[in-house]
Image (cartoon, helix red, strand yellow):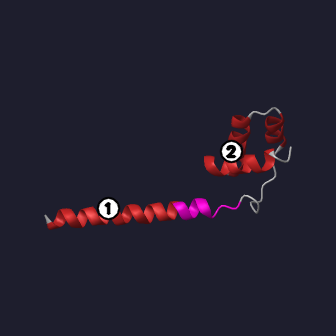
Amino acid sequence: MLLFWILLFATFATTLVIQKSINNYVDDFDVESYPYTPSSDVVDAMLEEDEEDAIRLIREETGLGLLHGKKLYNKFFTDY
């Protein structure tokens, strides 16, 4: 029974540590200071209002995930 509680506590603690590191990673992304200039393909997709294609291209060019690609899209879309 003691082993059960130890494993349960270890699982809970590990989950908290992983969640904390994920939150820090997401919160640390500063879209304003990220060094990225949209390519002509991204700009064309933005001008055509093809959000999915523009985000896909941004993610391919930067290697970022969906959340950060969407943030970059929103930053640049307001400029065009």
- Please identify the residue farthest to the left as the structure is shown: 1
What secondary structure prevails in the magenta region?
helix
Single out the mark in the foreground, 1 or 2.
1
Pointers 1 and 2 in contact (C-beta within 8 Å) = no
Tell me the residue at 68%/46% (across/down).
70
Of callouts 1 and 2, which one flags the residue occurring earlier in the amino acid sequence?
1
Residue 10 location in percent, x, y?
A: 30, 66
Q: Amino acid at mark 2?
A: Glu
Residue 61, given in percent of the width and then of the height, sits at: 72, 47
Q: Residue at x 56, y 65 (%)?
A: 24
Residue 17 falls inside the magenta stretch: no
Q: Is residue 70 left or right of residue 19?
A: right
Disc 1 secondary structure class: helix
Looking at the rendered structure, the secondary structure element under dot 2 is helix
The correct choice, above or below, for 22 with respect to 49 in the image is below
Q: Residue at x 71, y 35 (%)?
A: 53
**Measured from the top left, where is residue 52 in percent x and y?**
69, 36
The answer, for residue 65, to whether it is visible in the render is no
Judge left or right: residue 9 versus residue 64: left
Give the residue pinned by disc 2: 60
Question: What amino acid is labelled 1 in the image?
Answer: Thr
The quarter holding residue 13 reads bottom left
The mark tally for this picture is 2
Q: Residue furthest front?
A: 78
Residue 11, which numbered label?
A: 1
Q: Magenta segment: does it hold 27?
A: yes
Query: For the magenta stretch, what is the residue range?
Result: 23-30
Percent x, y of residue 44 = 83, 36
Q: Residues within 10 Å of mark 2 (few under 14, many from 20)?
A: few
Q: Which quadrant of the structure image shows residue 57? A: top right
| Nearer to us in this view, 52 or 40 | 52
| Viewport quadrant of the N terminus | bottom left
